[in-house]
Amino acid sequence: MVQKSETIWFDGKQVPWDEANVHVLTHALHYATAVFEGIRAYECADGSSEVFRLRDHMVRLVDSTKILGIKMPYTADEMTEAAIETLKVNKLPGAYVRPLVFVGEGAMGVYPGDNPVRAIIAAWPWGAYLGEDALEKGISVRCSSFSRHHVNVMMVKAKASGNYVNSVLAKNEAIADGFDEAILLDTTGHVSEGTGENIFLVRDDVIYTPHLDGVLGGLTRDSIISLAGDLGYEVREEPIARDMLYVADEVFFTGTAAELTPISSVDRRQIGDGKAGPVAKLLQAEFFKIVKGENPDYEHWLHRYQA
Ligand code: PMP
């Protein structure tokens, strides 16, 4: 269960949590005409707080509305301000922040016409997405029987609600089969991403990740690529076949919710020694230092605020 906060920003106003409701004929509820973001705010070591890459997330949100052809009523800057306001009003020093832009009620056909476009930003405390243990010990994953979207079926650059039906199918299947998470292959059989994470592998100290064509442009992915480069690693963005996972020294997921989660086995094949590998451990430790405001070299990624 989500831990309730006091208010949710809804169409420009702070509304009590229990009153932030919509009509059942909301267009988005029927046809998934909605886009969203997942953002994390962290409490820093010095007592301040920061939202990690906040504006970049809001730019991606606006980009998602462009891809879906939704008329976005707010700019990235307005959404950035509204997110900070929501964190402050709810006195949240650390939180998961969820903006959602969706087509409201009006016309009921597939064509949304002039239905109003509505927006919310909710924020609530949220711990490790795949469990605290997962960050240290790693998780078991399977390659899903479902393929990730073909780029001309559902456009993956959009963080569109409809894209997540595919994620839910893969996640349900993985959990039912006793795994923690799924890896989706694309329609050519290459590795794409997790249900809500990007994926990396390490082989002979070189880091590999699928190129951006068929995956969401994760901001954690982008941060880890920069960080790994700064730490002297070679990072290659290229097509990855499934068997590359099986022979990898390390495999890990990145995402706002998942942060950097090591993968201990793929399809029941142990990866490395079945624990977080040295590269994942180093990148994870450095990533946590950055998001907790302990590395001034990356201060430009932090939007500081006082809860
Ligand atoms: N891929 C998918 C499908 C996701 O849902 C997410 C989470 N937003 C990611 C990758 C990682 O993106 P980010 O690092 O920006 O959270």
Image: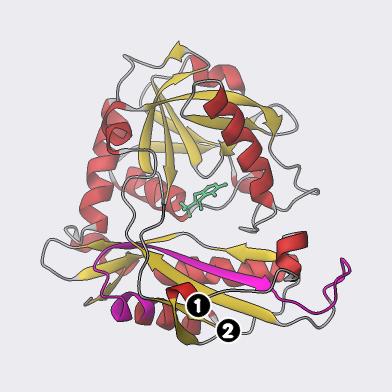
Q: Is residue 194 magenta?
A: no
What residue is drawn where x is 66% and y is 44%? 214
- Residue in the foreground of this view, choosing between 92 and 52: 92
Indicate which label's residue lies in the foreground, 2 or 1: 1
User: In the figure, 267 relative to 153: above or below?
Assistant: above
- Which of the marked residues, 2 or 1, is nearer the chain's N terminus? 1
Q: Is residue 161 visible?
A: yes
- Quadrant in the picture for the C terminus: bottom left
Point out residue 205 in the picture as x, y percentages from the top left corner. Answer: 35, 26
User: Mark 2: which secondary structure?
Assistant: loop
Q: Which residue is mark 2?
A: 74
Start-end of magenta stretch: 86-112
Q: Eyeballing the image, is 42 above or below 194?
A: below
Query: Looking at numbered disc 2 in the image, what kind of residue is underneath it?
Result: Tyr
Q: Relative to 254, say whether 85 is above or below.
A: below
Quadrant housing residue 29: bottom right
Label 1: which secondary element: helix
Cβ–Cβ under 8 Å for marks 2 and 1: no
State whether residue 239 appears in this view: no
Q: Nearer the viewer, residue 177 or 239?
A: 177
Between residue 212 and residue 307, name the one nearer to us: 307
| Residue 235: image tag | none
